[in-house]
Image (spheres, rainbow, N blue to C red):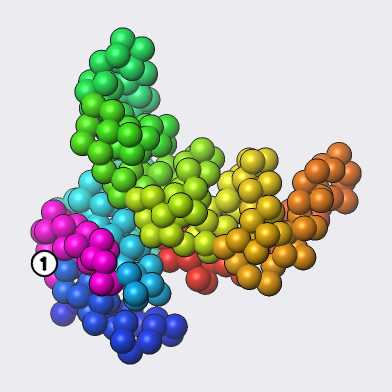
């Protein structure tokens, strides 16, 4: 029997949505799981259950992972609901992907774009993404979001931005943050927006730092953080000062630690 994890902040009126997500996973078939979770996530009626829907999003992205990166030996319930098993399973799977071939596919996609062969480019970006190349994943996300040579799919595009972000792709992090800010492909979510700008900033992306600081200073995405945002913004403008660099590092680290418990897709 598949049992959903317990979440402390979920009200009783939200539990039917999580129960439905658990039932979706019990379908077993990867495509069926993904299809049902997409229905739940995109259903207008479910948008009033924001806290629960954020958790459904986690399992939706995990469904894409399961579809594309699981093996016949993968324990379905554990993959979705056991964090340690999921992390270990995905790490092992990615370690065995042929990244060299993924890089070659990415190069072929760039060549195809130069020759205006968009369908070929889309297919090569997809191949590169499935072989674990973060540049391929990011660019396949761009391709899906634009519908260049492939059917447009903003939701799957966001998954690939997320997948590339997990591998440290800074542009993917920035794009994902913007998607959460605008509600494109994912639900509008200020906390997730701040989180991915923050992750980009920690990775060394100055635009991510400025965006994170600016949003906090204006009270966008998170409340009661204007003072920290203003200080971060000021420090970011004077990076030649060693004390400012130290302050930024400590502030970003502390903010990430504070946000992590509330971010499901991290």
Nearest the eye: 100 or 172: 172
Counting from the top left corner in percent of width and height, residue 238 is at 84, 43
Is residue 224 at least partly visible in the picture? yes
Q: Is residue 235 left or right of residue 199?
A: right
Residue indicated by mark 1? 27
Counting from the top left corner in percent of width and height, residue 245 is at 80, 48
In the rendered picture of this protein, how many numbered marks are placed on residues?
Answer: 1
Q: Residue at x 42, y 32 (%)?
A: 135
Nearest the eye: 100 or 46: 46
Q: Is residue 11 above or below residue 197?
A: below
* Residue sitting farthest toward the top: 115
Q: Is residue 224 above or below residue 167?
A: below
Main SS category, magenta section: helix
Counting from the top left corner in percent of width and height, residue 212 is at 64, 53
Q: Is residue 126 left or right of residue 261?
A: left
Counting from the top left corner in percent of width and height, residue 156 is at 29, 47
Q: Is residue 36 magenta?
A: yes
Instruction: Please identify the quadrant where the N terminus is shown.
Output: bottom left
Is residue 127 at least partly visible in the picture? no
* Residue sitting farthest toward the bottom: 12
Q: Dividing the picture into quarters, in which one does residue 45 lie?
A: bottom left
- Residue neighbourhood size for the residue with mark 1, other residues' Cα within 10 Å, grouped as few (<14), some (14–19), many (≥20): some
Q: Residue at x 11, y 59 (%)?
A: 32
Q: Is residue 178 above or below residue 43?
A: above
Q: Is residue 61 left or right of residue 198?
A: left
Q: Is residue 37 magenta?
A: yes
Residue at disc 1, secondary structure: loop
Nearest the eye: 51 or 80: 51
Q: Residue at x 40, y 74 (%)?
A: 51
Q: Residue at x 52, y 56 (%)?
A: 193
> Which segment did they paint magenta?
25-46
Q: Dividing the picture into quarters, in which one does residue 203 lie?
A: top right
């Amino acid at each position: 029997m598949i049992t959903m994890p317990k979440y402390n902040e979920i009200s009783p009126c939200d539990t039917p949505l999580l129960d439905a997500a658990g039932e979706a996973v019990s379908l077993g078939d990867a495509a069926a799981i993904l299809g049902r979770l997409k229905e739940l996530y995109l259903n207008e009626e479910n948008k009033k259950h924001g806290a629960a829907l954020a958790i459904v999003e986690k399992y939706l992205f995990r469904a894409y992972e399961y579809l594309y990166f699981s093996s016949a030996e993968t324990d379905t319930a554990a993959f979705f609901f056991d964090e340690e098993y999921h992390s270990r399973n995905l790490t092992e799977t990615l370690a065995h992907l042929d990244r060299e071939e993924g890089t070659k596919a990415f190069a072929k996609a760039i060549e195809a774009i130069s020759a205006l062969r968009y369908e070929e480019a889309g297919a090569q970006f997809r191949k590169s993404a499935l072989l674990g190349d973060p540049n391929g994943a990011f660019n396949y996300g761009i391709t899906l979001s634009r519908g260049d040579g492939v059917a447009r799919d903003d939701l799957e595009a966001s998954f690939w931005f997320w997948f590339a972000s997990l591998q440290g792709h800074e542009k993917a992090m920035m794009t994902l943050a913007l998607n959460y800010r605008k509600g494109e492909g994912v639900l509008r979510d200020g906390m997730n927006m701040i989180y991915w700008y923050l992750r980009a900033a920690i990775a060394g992306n100055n635009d991510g730092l400025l965006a994170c600081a600016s949003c906090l200073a204006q009270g966008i995405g998170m409340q009661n953080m204007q003072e920290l945002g203003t200080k971060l913004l000021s420090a970011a403008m004077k990076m030649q000062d060693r004390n400012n660099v130290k302050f930024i590092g400590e502030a970003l680290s502390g903010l990430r630690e504070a946000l992590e418990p509330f971010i499901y897709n991290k």
